[in-house]
Image (cartoon, helix red, strand yellow):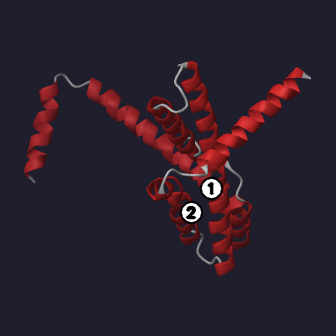
């Protein structure tokens, strides 16, 4: 029973942090904190949709990115604010002090910035359905290109090993300079 109360208190504290991080201090803070999540990243996602995407698919991809960006920014910013409040309380700062507010703000920013990592791995069903509609034979092509890439990388690795091994056999370093300096004049 005690763990449910602790979990509920932690959830309430997180929700309070999310609510407080959703209320920026001023318009400039709002533009810095939420501007890219609302304006820039969704527009870039819609613009960079695969060629042949319909307008509705592009809008859906943009909205999907907006929901992921804004939601994760609020969630992680709120978690950062909660962590900042706890750190400030442990250090003995009064909630009205400038040090408390500064630590809380820095932790909110760190939490907001750390939201970028999970966004990279978040599922994007609208984008995935658009790609599968436009490129139905993609898995076979990906497998072939993966095999070609691995073969090319193996050849490059072998050539690099041969070059590095051959350079170890040179009698002195100036011998390489004797070869390179006439080529530099060309």
Residue at which label 2 appears: 38
Judge the density around disc 2: few (<14), some (14-19), many (≥20) Cα neighbours within 10 Å: some
**Contact flag, marks 2 and 1 (Cβ < 8 Å):** yes
Residue drawn at point x = 66 percent, y = 45 percent: 18
Quadrant in the rendering for residue 8: top right
Place of residue 172 in the rendered image (x, y in percent of width and height, measured from the top left): 16, 23
Place of residue 146 in the rendered image (x, y in percent of width and height, measured from the top left): 61, 51
Place of residue 155 in the rendered image (x, y in percent of width and height, measured from the top left): 47, 42
Position of residue 141 relative to residue 92, above or below, is below
> Nearest the camera: 43 or 98?
98
Residue 31 falls left or right of residue 135: left
Residue 135 visible here: no
Q: How many marks?
A: 2
> Nearest the camera: 37 or 121?
37
Place of residue 110 in the rendered image (x, y in percent of width and height, measured from the top left): 52, 38
Which residue is situated farthest in the right direction here? 1
Residue drawn at point x = 27 percent, y = 29 percent: 167
Residue at which label 1 appears: 70
């Amino acid at each position: 029973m005690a763990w449910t109360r602790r979990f509920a208190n932690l959830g309430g504290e997180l929700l309070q942090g999310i609510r407080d991080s959703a209320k920026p201090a001023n318009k400039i803070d709002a533009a810095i904190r939420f501007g890219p999540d609302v304006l820039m990243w969704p527009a870039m996602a819609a613009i960079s949709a695969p060629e042949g995407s319909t307008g509705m698919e592009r809008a859906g991809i943009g909205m999907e990115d907006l929901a992921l960006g804004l939601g994760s920014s609020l969630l992680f910013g709120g978690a950062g604010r909660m962590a900042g409040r706890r750190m400030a309380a442990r250090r003995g700062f009064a909630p009205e002090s400038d040090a408390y507010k500064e630590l809380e703000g820095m932790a909110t920013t760190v939490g907001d910035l750390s939201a970028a990592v999970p966004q990279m791995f978040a599922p994007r069903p609208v984008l995935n359905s658009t790609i599968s509609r436009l490129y139905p034979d993609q898995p076979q092509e990906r497998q072939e290109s993966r095999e070609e890439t691995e073969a090319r990388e193996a050849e490059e690795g072998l050539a690099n090993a041969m070059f590095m091994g051959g350079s170890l056999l040179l009698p002195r370093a100036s011998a390489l300079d004797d070869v390179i300096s006439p080529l530099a004049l060309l």
